[in-house]
Structures are given as C-alpha cells and as structure tokens.
Amino acid sequence: MTRSKAALLSLLLAIALPACSKSSDVLPTEAETEESVAGSAPVEDVLSAEQAELIGRGEAIAETACAGCHAVGAADESPHPDAPPLRLLSQTVDLDTLEARFAQGSVSDHPDMPDWQFEQIDAAGLIAYLKSVQSGSAN
Ligand code: HEC
C-alpha cells in the first residue's frame, strides 16, 4: 500500500513537473511584453494616418484640378454639363485602373477633358480621395 502510494506520487510528479516548466517557457516575461509594445505604434494607426494623408492630398488636387468641370463634393452639380460628378465615377470607371490611366494621361477622349500626368503618389492620392467620396456603388 505505501509502495503503491509512492509509485502513484512519483507518477503524478513526472506528469506535473514538465508541464509546469513548459508553461513558463511559453509565456513571455513581463519585460519582453513591454519591449514589443513600446517599439512602435499599432499598425492600424500608421496605415490610417497614411491613408488620411493620401486622401487629403487627393482632395486638394481634385479641388484645384477637377472642380472647374466636375462636382467634387457630396451633393454639388458639375459645372461642365458633360463631366460626371467625381462621387459617381465608380459607376462608369474602374477606379483601380484609373490610377494607371492618370499616370499615363489617358483618362477620357472628350475634347474638354484635359490629359493629366500626375506623379505616382499624387495619382494614388487622387484615387484614394475618389474612393472616399464614392456614393451609390460598392466602392
Ligand atoms: C476642363 C474640364 C474638365 C476638367 C478640369 C476635368 N475634367 Fe474630367 N472630364 C471632363 C469631361 C467633359 C469629361 C467627359 C465625360 C464623358 O466622357 O461623357 C470628363 C471625363 C472624366 C472621366 C471619365 C468618366 C467616364 O465615365 O468615362 C474621369 C475619370 C475624369 N473626367 C476625371 C477627372 C479628374 C479626376 C479631374 C481632375 C484631376 C478631371 N477629370 C478634370 C471635363 C473635365
């Protein structure tokens, strides 16, 4: 009886001890956790700040370069009767390929629509802005 109790006890220890040391290996120490958090800002914050910067740049371009013909706001009318409001562009144009077309300066064949050549970042900003103002479509 004492013999089987001792055997049972050592069996339990054999199971329990490795399990304990293993769990303390897996859990990070407090110092490690703080280090990785303090290293940089959360990824989402960095991305949204970049996105906001892009959109702001695109909005400035739209207001100076497009607003003479296209409506740029949420409810205004286009000054040029043939120019669609920018908020409706995604109904007729694929905004993802539009960025490349802006970079190449081939957006519309209409004689009144100027050919633009934006620096890559400005085209990206303009597209980000256009996407942010779309209404009535998946974009
Ligand atoms: C001088 C007037 C004018 C300016 C400035 C102008 N556009 Fe246009 N845009 C037009 C006209 C007119 C059309 C032709 C609409 C059509 O094809 O029926 C057009 C067409 C477009 C189209 C194609 C729409 C489609 O459905 O195919 C896009 C995209 C576009 N413009 C974006 C812009 C952007 C972005 C800017 C500013 C960077 C801009 N335009 C500046 C007059 C202008």
Image: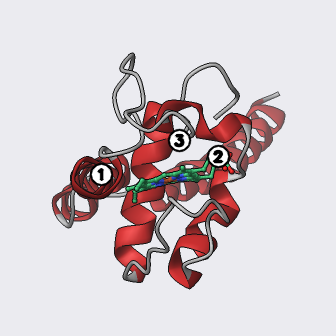
Mark 3 = which residue? 83
Q: Residue at x 19, y 56 (%)?
A: 34
> Eyeballing the image, is 97 above or below 72?
below
Ranked by sequence position, the earlier of labels 3 and 1 is 1
Mark 1 = which residue? 42
Q: Distance between the residues labelled 2 and 1?
A: 43 Å
* Residue 116 horizontal/vertical position (percent): 44, 74
- Name the side, left or right, on which 133 lies relative to 68: right
* Residue 79 horizontal/vertical position (percent): 37, 33
Q: Does the beta carbon of the residue at mark 3 sit less than 8 Å from ligand 1?
A: yes
Residue type at tag 3: Ala
Ranked by sequence position, the earlier of labels 3 and 2 is 2
Q: What element carries label 1?
A: loop
The quadrant in which the C terminus is found is: top right
Mark 2 = which residue? 13
- Name the side, left or right, on which 100 lies relative to 36: right
Asked if the residues shown at circle 2 and circle 1 are in contact, with their CB atoms under 8 angstroms apart, the answer is: no
Q: Residue at x 16, y 59 (%)?
A: 38
Q: Which residue is at the front of the view, 2 or 93?
A: 93
Q: How far apart are marks 3 and 1 (CA)?
A: 41 Å
How many numbered marks, from 0 up?
Answer: 3
Q: Which residue is at the front of the view, 136 or 62?
A: 62
Q: Is mark 3 on a helix, strand or loop?
A: loop
Residue type at tag 1: Pro
Q: Which residue is drawn at 64% across and 19% down?
A: 136
